[in-house]
Amino acid sequence: MSRSAGRVTAALLGVGVLAGGVWAAEIAVPTDARTISAALLKASPGDTVWVADGVYRERIMLPHDVALMARARFAAVIDGGGRGTVVTLGKNNCLVGFEIRNGTIGLFTNGAGNAVRFCRIVRNWQTGVVCVRHLPALEDNIIAFNGGSGIQGWDVRSSVASVNHNTIAFNANHGIAVGGSSNFVVENNIIAYNERFGLRIHEESEKGVRVANNNLYQNLSQRGGVPKGNFSFDPAFLSPRRKMNFNADPKRCCTIKGTDNENLGARLSY
């Protein structure tokens, strides 16, 4: 388990974390600081910032080795005000449980050791998630209704992190676009209803990006068809546009499972 993943697990269990010989602090928004940005200025390596429900109209940059956690899934919204990058990660950050919306780019990351889990990254004017060099662990996120691609990566590499169990849908460009010399794993995702390719992998990265056990459905185009070892079936979303509910209708959905015998896409319940 990575340092960042271990820190978040400990925080969820309500126990302290030893960082550099000092017990890590927990900072609450808005109790200890009125804004997320103000709380992050107070944070030291190893600290966890907990964010209460509400809409936070700010653009934030996480310092290294800090976890940022929403107290209730999707109830803490970071709204970029229609311009700029809403959330920029440093190194060894964990980001869990937020809705990130209304920026030019939803999330930018180029540092090592980051993890983004159970977030909803939606309705940004361009790309949902931009990754450069280091791939964060992207797990159980909804990345949808963005004006560009859902995820865009360049020279992205990881032997540990992967793009795993996300739902990437209804984006106005590609579901996932990868360029440069990249090497990582894409597995167990639902990539559906994107307006261009479900997966657009530059030829320089084709040997390095392993694509397995994903459901690619009704994207406008998929060069060469669905890659071997992947699927194409109706994900039967219950109410994606009206309620942001991307769970599958059990009466209509296929029962194909992921490599871990769990349902494909983000493992969320509403």
Image: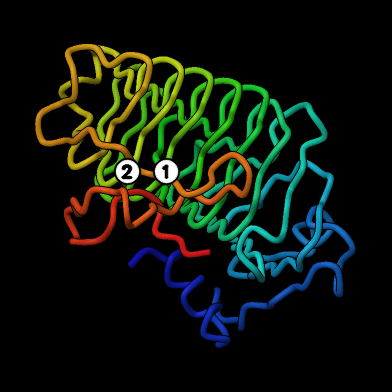
Task: Tell me the residue that label 2 is attached to.
Answer: 189
* Residue 255 place in picture, x, y as percent: 21, 54
Q: Amino acid at mark 1?
A: Thr
Q: Is residue 140 above or below residue 157?
A: below
* 133 horizontally vs 107: left or right: left
Q: Quadrant of residue 44?
A: bottom right
Q: Residue at x 34, y 25 (%)?
A: 218
* Residue 66 place in picture, x, y as percent: 61, 61
* 175 horizontally vs 51: left or right: left
For label 2, the SS is loop
For label 1, the SS is strand
- The CA distance from mark 2 to mark 1 is 6 Å
**Marks 1 and 2: in contact by CB < 8 Å?**
yes
Q: Nearer the viewer, residue 94 or 218?
A: 218
Of all residues, the one furthest to the bottom in this rendering is 15
Q: Residue at x 25, y 36 (%)?
A: 233
Q: Is residue 161 visible?
A: no
Counting residues from the start of the chain, the first of labels 2 and 1 encountered is 1
Q: Is residue 49 above or below residue 255?
A: below
* Residue 129 place in picture, x, y as percent: 53, 34
Task: Tell me the residue that label 1 is attached to.
Answer: 167
